[in-house]
Structure formats: C-alpha cells, structure tokens
C-alpha cells in the first residue's frame, strides 16, 4: 500500500487529487498540509490521516512514500525539491514552476535523489487526445501543415477554493503568470504530445484585457495569451489561452493536413471529426472533454500510482514537460520584447 501526503488542500486537491487517491485501492491518504490548517483538518476528517502544521512535518513522516504538490504556482519548486530531498516521490500540479531554472532544478533533484517526478498535464490522458495522436501518426490527414489549439473559459475566480476577485490566481506574487500558466501550458504540452514535435520558435502576445481585481484595477497577470508556434519539423500553428471566454468553455484543437483536417473537442456532438477531401466525415465518439463545470476522473492519479507500484518513470515526467515550459517562458519573453524568440534547446 502506497502512503500518500498532500501539500496544499485547495480546489485542485479537493476535486481531483484527494478523491482520486481515495478511489484507488493501491494507496492510502495519510497526511495533509495547507497554510490554512483548517482545510487540511477538513480533509483529514473526511478521508483519514493527519493534518500537519508545516510541510516539513509532513515530509518528515517516514511512512509517506509520495506526495502531491497542489500549492499555488510560486511554491511548486520549493515544495517539490524539499519533498524529493526528503525521500518522497512527487506529483506536482501544473505549471511546473515559475522560472525555467526552477523547472530544471526540479528535474535535476529528482535524478540525484533517485525519485520519480511527474507533472499533472492531464490533457495527454484525455481519450480523444490519445486516439488523435494515433490517427496522426498513422497519417490519417496526411502530413500536418498547420494547427490551431485553444483553451478558454470565464476565469479561475469561480473555480478557486476562495472564489471571487481576491483569488490567488490574480496575484502576480503567487501565480507569476495568468492564463498562460493556467491554461496555455496545457495546450503547449498537448500540441507537442499530439505532433511528437517540440516548439522551437514562438511569437506571442500576453496581455490583460478585462479581468479586474477587488480594487477595480486590471489584474497583474495576463488574462489572454496568443502564440504562434513553430514546431521542430516546420509545422506552424496558433495557441490561445483565455480567461475571458464567458459564454462557454473552449478546449479544442484542429489540425490541417495534406489530405484533410482533424477536429478534436471542436464539435459538441463528436469528440473527433475527421474530414478527408472528397470523403464523408468520420466520427470518433470517444468521450467529452472535462470542463470546470463537468469534472470527471483525470487519469493522472491512477497513472501515478501505477508508476509508483512498478517503480518506473511516468510518461508525463518532469523531464518530458520542461520543453513545454521553455515554450511558455519564451512566449513571455516574446511578448515583453515584441520579437520572435528561438528555443534552441528544443531543436
């Protein structure tokens, strides 16, 4: 039985990590930490285990094999590195960290400590994305030429454990980035996964157009990010992340190839629509995408526990996600400088 600790008991922990651990027969929740201790106490009362006063106290428990880091963005690297050095395997929420050097240090520490590090990039596990990757590899639409991918919803203020305009997502010190870190990292990582190619060049605009904090001023992080990505094989496409899609959530990806096009989570009736020139459309009704209002099992926890049981590296390892984080930070640089930014490490 794998013993699990939770570092951060906010919304993502309460909706995804904790209940999915509780549903897995091969693990046991034994420890919880949150800066507001009452949240940890609530989780311990509901699921069993102990609420700790500090992260260090939780990490000093020799029974705990692995932890989920579900804290605010700024704390990801610090908690992950502390946990790895304490001999724990780590599943860290996205975004991996708030600087590239922190991301790289997390990967380095995991290797040095001989521990597993996985990042919660759950879009790779969505069934339509798994099927789409296989279809693309088989040449279902020929060679991909261009793409567009988007992830947008009405913003995190209704999702956060403390809903409203005071959410930590709007606080630059805690979040560092806005929609780009919250949603853009998902689609950046996903496009690399689907194409089997890394982003090597980005031209981006990160901006704050509409979101205002409790003081009435525009928030200190981006609420929209639009990027033009060039992949290592020359494919070019756009990635949009937005907190201002107020009517409905959009989590779609469309590929345009030499023999047709593929639409993923773009048609509300069909999870994949494949259109080839001169042929009737093909429909792959795999499953509907999760939304903030329709949460289903992510698959992340079950994959994580399987990796821990077998002692094998996760396909969503920290090392595999660093290239997507490079594209995120390069996009921030591109927006700040107003120029395209190369990512030579991804070539």
Image: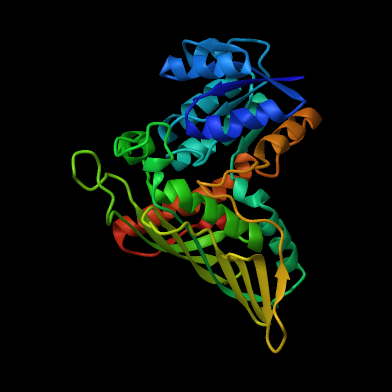
Q: Quadrant of the C terminus?
A: bottom right
- Residue 188 vs 107, above or below: the answer is below
Picture quarter with the N terminus: top right
Residue at the right extreme of this rendering: 310
Q: Which residue is farthest left?
A: 216
Q: Residue at x 29, y 39 (%)?
A: 165
> Looking at this view, is 34 or 56 the one in front?
34
Residue 259 in the image: state x and y as whole percent.
68, 82
Query: Above or below — where is 21 with respect to 223?
Result: above
Q: Position of residue 115 (x, y in %)?
A: 67, 27
Which residue is located at x 51 percent, y 69 percent? 237
State the image quarter where residue 59 is shown: top right
- Residue 175 in percent (x, y) is at 38, 38
Q: Is residue 127 visible?
A: yes
Find residue 235 and report its horizontal and vertical position in percent: 57, 71
Does 269 appear above or below 314?
below
- Is 176 displayed left or right of 309 in the figure? left
């Amino acid at each position: 039985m794998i013993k699990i600790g939770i570092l951060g008991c906010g919304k993502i922990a309460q909706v995804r990590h904790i209940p999915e651990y509780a549903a897995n027969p091969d693990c046991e929740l034994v420890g919880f930490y949150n800066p507001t201790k009452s949240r940890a106490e609530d989780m311990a009362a509901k699921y069993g285990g102990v609420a700790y006063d500090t992260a260090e106290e939780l990490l000093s428990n020799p029974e705990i094999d692995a932890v989920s880091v579900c804290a605010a963005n700024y704390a990801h690297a610090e908690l992950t590195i502390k946990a790895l050095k304490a001999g724990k395997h780590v599943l860290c929420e996205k975004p991996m960290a708030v600087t590239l050097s922190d991301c790289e240090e997390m990967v380095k520490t995991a290797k040095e400590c001989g521990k597993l590090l996985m990042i919660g990039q759950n879009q790779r596990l969505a069934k339509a994305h798994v099927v789409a990757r296989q279809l693309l590899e088989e040449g279902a639409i020929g060679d991909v030429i261009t793409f567009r991918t988007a992830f947008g919803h009405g913003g995190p203020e209704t999702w956060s454990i403390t809903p409203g305009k005071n959410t930590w997502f709007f606080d630059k010190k805690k979040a560092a980035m806005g929609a780009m870190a919250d949603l853009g990292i998902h689609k950046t990582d996903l496009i690399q996964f689907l194409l089997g190619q890394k982003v090597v060049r980005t031209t981006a605009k990160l901006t704050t157009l509409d979101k205002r904090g409790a003081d009435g001023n525009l928030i200190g992080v981006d609420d929209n990010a639009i990027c033009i990505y060039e992949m290592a094989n020359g494919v070019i496409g756009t990635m949009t992340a937005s907190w201002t899609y107020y009517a409905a959530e959009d989590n779609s990806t469309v590929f345009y190839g030499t023999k047709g096009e593929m639409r993923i989570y773009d048609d509300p009736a069909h999870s994949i629509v494949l259109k080839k020139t001169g042929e009737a459309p093909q429909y792959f009704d795999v499953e509907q995408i999760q939304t903030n209002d329709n949460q289903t099992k992510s698959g992340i926890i079950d994959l994580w526990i399987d990796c821990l049981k077998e002692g094998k590296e996760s396909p969503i390892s920290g090392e595999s996600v660093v290239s997507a984080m490079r594209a995120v930070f390069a996009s921030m640089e591109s927006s700040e400088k107003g120029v395209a930014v190369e990512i030579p490490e991804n070539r």
